[in-house]
Amino acid sequence: MPRPLIVPSLLALLSLSACDSSSTPDPDTQGCEQFDFPQSPQTEARHLSSCSNSACGSGATESENPPSSGLHCGSVARCGVYTEPVSRCLYIHNLEHGHAVFLYNCPDGCPDEVAKLEAAASSVPAGANGVRRSLVAQDPLMPNRVAALLWRRAYVTDSADPEALRCLLKLQDTEAPEPGLSCPGS
């Protein structure tokens, strides 16, 4: 006697409902609810024909320091670790491409903070060319010691929390106008 067709359909339905991930927390974002990385206001994001830090880098608002969006150079900065400052005009373009930017301002040195930023930068996925889509550099214009930036998102503090850095990076490429683009390496 043939089996009723309802049994295989019922089994398929039960197996699909067992895979529902809505009740199971995502292990990649677990613990991230304690951090808030609000988006800065939408701002004009176009390339400037001539670049200087005075022409760009003000960010979405005058109070956004360091900027995470806004007018920027037509070129990007090479990804990697810098011991000198990188032009804001350049790194804003990196942010537009979905790259992560890690900055520090420690006139007296802060090797522990820089190490946290470098560790976070090394966790960023590489682009198609094999270069990690992140850069670490000084920014002497920042009021705080460290910052981690994505397009229109900033984590600015005096002591970086590695867990906060991990959670911020879960948002990489989510709002960038040109997400996922590779970064030239140094």
Image: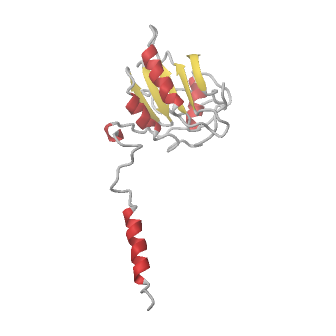
Does residue 12 show up? yes
Left or right, 50 with respect to 145, comes to right
Does residue 86 show up? no
The residue that appears at 37% across and 63% down in the rendered structure is 18
Residue 39, above or below 108? below
Colour mapping: secondary structure
Q: Quadrant of the N terminus?
A: bottom left
The residue that appears at 43% across and 34% down in the rendered structure is 166
Percent position (x, y) of residue 86? 58, 21
Instruction: Name the residue nearer the viewer: 7 or 13.
Output: 7
Instruction: Name the residue nearer the viewer: 133 or 49.
Output: 133
Instruction: Name the residue nearer the viewer: 72 or 112.
Output: 112
The residue that appears at 41% across and 66% down in the rendered structure is 16
Check the image and name the residue furthest to the top.
108
Check the image and name the residue furthest to the front.
1
Percent position (x, y) of residue 181? 62, 40
Percent position (x, y) of residue 9? 43, 78
Q: Quadrant of the C terminus?
A: top right
Q: Where, by quadrant of the figure, is residue 37 drawn?
A: top left
Q: What is the tally of numbered marks visible in this picture?
A: 0
Residue 111, above or below 73? above
The residue that appears at 42% across and 27% down in the rendered structure is 63
Percent position (x, y) of residue 82? 58, 19
Left or right, 10 with respect to 182, comes to left
